[in-house]
Every structure is written in structure tokens, then in C-alpha cells.
Amino acid sequence: MFTKVLIANRGEIAVRVIRACRELGIQSVAVYSELDRNALHTRLADEAYALGGETAAESYLNTEKILEIIENNEIDAVHPGYGFFSENAEFAQAITDKGVTFIGPPVGAIAVMGDKISARQAAEKVGVSGVPGTTNFITSASEVEDFATEHGFPVAIKAAYGGGGRGMKVVQSKDEIQGAIDSSQREALAYFGRDEIYMERYLTNPRHIEVQVLCDQHGNALYLGTRDCSAQRRHQKLIEEAPAPGIPESILTAMGEAAVAVAKGCEYVNAGTVEFLYENKEFYYLEMNTRLQVEHPVTEMVTGIDLVEQQLRVAYGEKLTMRQEEVQISGHAIEVRINAEDPAEGQFLPSPGKLSSFKSSGGFGTRWDGGYEEGDEISQFYDNLIGKLVCWGRDRDTAIARTIRALEEFEVRGLATTIPADIAILNHSDFANIEHSTKWVEEVLDLSGVKGNKIETEHGGNQLSIREAEIEVNGKRFEVSLSVPSPNTQIRRSASSAGASAAGGDGNISVPMQGTIVKIKVSEGDFVNAGDILVVLEAMKMENNIASDVSGVITAITVQEGDSVGAGDVIITIETAD
């Protein structure tokens, strides 16, 4: 087995891989940015090395620095987690060229499936059909307009080299095309390092169904059941469950067999996920994610198979020890992604900050996969996933009830989370009756009154306290303890609106969260109407439109594109029309 594995990631997935390595007697090596010096994954790993920088581009996407760490520290394998380099063929090739094992599929499979266009073509070659779409990158707004003329609106514009809803924009009319193209490319570049995009027809009421596949280097391939990931906001998943409920067994089997066919068609190795859209008892191939999925724990809970362990064993060259007929699905599992977001009555606003108090729940059939502990800071520069609650039950109703109970036990202070919205989803009759779709949260679910409470972060007076810190020697991390003065009490409020200032309609436009201004759509002297989009704010890798709360003339703009802003900062002043 491998001796030393570097995890080229952060947060809960890095923690998950570190724990699997420890159970197998493998040394784990973490990497970290300036902001993650004392993050949970750096604390748990056997070794940790500095990447420098704050943003993902400056740190976790710094290929040169990661390769330098690999060369200097006798690393024999790299686990990419998900996001960042997990579906980057160039990175996998660079690792392989150094004689280091990439814990994932072969470079060729990543290249085929990482490009969503060639992935569609590969699926079609093995007889698996997808949603109508293009097989070329979008280069102009006119191409989207022509596609919509043939297939109708809405049209989905998607990142060609990404997934997880990042970079995906839905266009409802001709006037929205250029703005959606620009926004999709910005998000794709920020999260995946590439900005190529493509388009496909956007189904009106589908469910999002996944099939987990596992393939070894000896030609063996399995599917490990299905997952339903239909409870989404902004095309990103909130709640996942396994197996996918309410679908005839014959269709589930057909999906599984189609997924294996797609995997074998590109000579896939390691864990991967084939995604489908399901509507009116028909399913369409969507894409293949050539990595471990965020929602892999629900599959683990119903199959009893440790997917990260299997990834490590397969990458080392071991054969799968089970046959398809031996894969058994037991009970039902639900995973809830707990994000640092204020539900904000359906707006879902990023809420970076410090976990001043944090206690997760436990109990029978209850699992917590987290990337943070009490006292940790969740930065605007990274994904806002705090962790994942996973609950198993003997049937779906039991799993739902157990998940609600576990969510209600959570204690979180210092920032807002999606927990109130998660509870609203799980308590809704549409979810219980499997009548929800990928658009249900945003178009049907009533989240009126569901929002984050006032956020208070309290500290003591002028007393000294013992704090853990770390120092670096030649880029390697060491922990030390020291006495520091306690800061004064600080109290702040969570954001409640992406479109209005805190003053409530006085023309002083403030931002509701910490972030970076990526686009200013107006100029001083412009007349705007209430509701017009003024700027685009990026926070936690999501773009948020900041709108005017009044009609009037813009008299001052105090920010530029690229500026960082804090929650409550006034960025634009509007003289109201009388």
C-alpha cells in the first residue's frame, strides 16, 4: 500500500481522506493557504505544508508549488478530493509524469469526461443518450440565440470543465444571454481554472439521479446503487438520498447498466459518478464526474462500502473483491449539506465568518463529516460547505425523521447556516411524497420567514487566554501554544437581502456579505429603477446580484471591480426620485 499520500484539497473532503489514510496505516500530507494555516485538515494530517496565498488561484490551484512539495517530501500518491484539480487532466498528467500515483481515473478518461462535450459524444457511442445540446464551445451570444430558436427557452449554459452547479446559468430570454455567458465564464474560471462553456436544453421538471460506479485496473466495473439529488438551489445540491426513491426497479437497473457502459466506454478506473436527469419515466445522460462526489457518504451508508478506501486500493492496483450481484442496498440514507449561508427567505446568501460555537449532533445511524470545528473561520474565498450530516434509517420515513431530529440538535453561532431551510425541505409533504424536482426549492418551496438569526460573536474583556498557533520552518507546519489578549466583544448581524441596503430604501446601497466586486453594471449619473442590478458580488465562489432599493440617479460609486468589501459596506449612493 502507499506510504505517503498528499491531499491536494481542503475542508471536509481533505479531513475525510486523511481519516481513511490513517485507518490504512498511510501517512497523510496536507497543503494549506495562508487563511488555512490552522484549519482542521492541517491539524489532523501527519504533515502539512504551506502553499502561500489566500484565494484558490493563489494557493490550492498553484500547480508549481504543489509539485515542488511532492518532489521534496517523498510523496508516492496524490488524492485530489473534489473541486480544484480533481477533474484536471493536466494536473493528473503532471503528477503521473513524476512517477506519483494520481488517485483517480487515467488521464485519458479525465480528458474525455472532463470536457462535457466529448463526454456527451462518448456516451452516445455506447448507446446512452443525453439531453439535447451542443458539441461545441459557446463563442458568441448568437449561438445561444440560434439554439433557443430551435429548442426553445430556457437554455442551460454550463462550464465545460466543471460540475456541481458552478458556472451554470439558466437563460429564459434573449436579453439574458450575454450576461449569463459572462457570469458563467467568471464562475468557471474562478472555481475550475478554465472558462469554456457549452449549452443544452433545460428540462422543465426533472429529478437529478446519480449512479455511483467503481472500476479497477483489471477490467472490473460495478455500480453501487443510485442517489437522488433533486433538492437544489442555484443548481447546487442541498439534500441527497440513497437509493433514489419512487422510481421503478427496472429503470434503476437500466440506469446502473448505462452508467457502467459509459465508464467502460472511456476505460474508466477508480470511483466515479454518472449523472442522469429523470422525467416522465425516462432518463437522459447528463455528465460523468471523474472524482469522488460530495454526496458519496449516502452510498456508503446503504452499501457498507468505504469508497475512499476503495479509491486507495484501486489506485494501488488491487482488484475489486465483490461482484455486481453481491452489492446489497440496505435501508435508506439522507445527506444534508450544511453550508455557511443565510436562507434569507429563499435568497441563500453566503455567510462567511467564525464558528464561535459549534456542536454537531449524534445518535444511532447518524454521521457527521465536517471540515471545521468550533473556533474555526470560514472564509469568503472558498466553498461555503461546513460539513455533511448523514442519517441512515431502515426505510425512507425513518431516515427523514432521524435527519430532522439530528438537525434540530445542531448548535451553531457566529454565522448563518442552511439548517432552517433544510428542516423546511424535510418537513414538506412534497419531499415526503417525492413530488419535488431540481427546481422545486426555488419555484415551489415557501421559505417566507426562514432566515438566519442575528449573529453574535462574543469574547471576554482584557484577560489573557491560551491559544494554539502554528509556525513554519522551511514551509513545514508546527503547532505551538501562546498567551494572547482576548479581543473586545464584537456583534454583527447576518445579511438578510441581496438587493436592498440595511437602511431599508434610502438609496445607500450596501452589500449584505463579505466578498469581491466582480462587475459594476452602472455609472455615476445613470438613472436606475428599484430592482435594477447595480453590481455583481462574488462570495464563497458564488455570484450575487446587488440591486437598487429605490428609483433615482446614482451620485456616487465608492468601489471598483476587484475590490474586497465587508458586510454592510455602502458601495453606491442614489439620489431618490421625488
Image: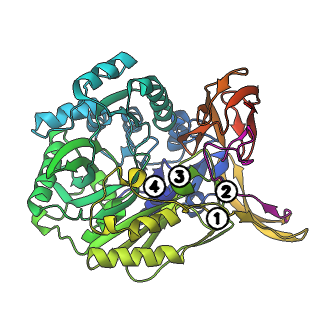
Residue identifier under label 4: 4
The reply to whether the C-beta atoms of the residues labelled 1 and 4 are less than 8 Å apart is no
Amino acid, disc 4: Lys
Question: Of callouts 4 and 3, which one flags the residue occurring earlier in the amino acid sequence?
Answer: 4
Q: Amino acid at mark 3?
A: Phe
Question: Is the residue under label 1 in contact with that under label 2 (CB below 8 Å)?
Answer: yes
Q: Residue at x 31, y 69 (%)?
A: 432
Name the N-terminal-most of marks 1 and 3. Answer: 3
The segment highlighted magenta reads 486-514
Give the SS element for disc 2: loop
Q: Quadrant of residue 142?
A: top left
Question: On screen, 22 above or below 513?
Answer: below
Residue 342 visible (yes or no): no
In the drawing, does residue 96 fall left or right of residue 495? left
Q: Nearer the viewer, residue 366 or 300?
A: 366
User: Secondary structure under badge 4?
Assistant: strand
Of tags 1 and 4, the one toward the viewer is: 1
| Residue ID for mark 2 | 494
Q: Position of residue 71 (x, y in %)?
A: 50, 40
> Residue at point 32% right, 70% down?
333
Q: Residue at x 27, y 52 (%)?
A: 207
Main structural element of the magenta stretch: helix, strand or loop? loop
First in sequence, mark 2 or 1: give its number: 1
